[in-house]
Amino acid sequence: MTTARSLTTPGSIFLDSRGGQRALKVSWHQEAGIVVLSLWRDNVCSATFRLAVDEVPDMIALLREGLDLAFESTRTARSA
């Protein structure tokens, strides 16, 4: 199970389940109206993606839909 670590600015770091010092850093930048998603490996940033704040609800909805499907699949498999 991966864990999230707190940042000094609003955001979190999520560790990749594959290990290898891989991580996803999510940081809010209210002044710019963006959320930055950055990919890290061995404490080096390898890529960033800037998501406009008004697009965040769509991303959350997509993640929520995937989570709902995952829970439903698990529940269905357990009851079979």
Image (tube, helix red, strand yellow):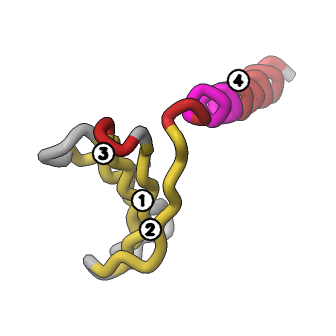
| The stretch drawn in magenta includes residue 27 | no
Farthest front residue? 32
Q: Are marks 2 and 1 in contact (CB under 8 Å)?
A: yes
Q: Which residue is mark 3?
A: 12
Single out the mark in the foreground, 3 or 4: 3
Residue to which mark 4 is pinned: 68
Q: Please tell me the numbered disc located at residue 69.
A: none
In the picture, measured across the screen, residue 69 lies left or right of residue 53, that is right
Residue 61 visible in this rendered orientation of the protein = yes
Q: Earlier in the sequence, mark 2 or mark 3?
A: 3
**Above or below for 61 versus 47:** above
Mark 2–mark 3 Cα distance, whole angstroms, equals 12 Å
**Residue located beneath label 2 in the image:** 39
> N-terminal of the two: label 2 or label 4?
2
Q: Is disc 1 placed on a helix, strand or loop?
A: strand
Of the image marks 2 and 1, the number of the one nearer the N terminus: 1
The residue under label 1 is 24
Q: Is residue 41 left or right of residue 69?
A: left
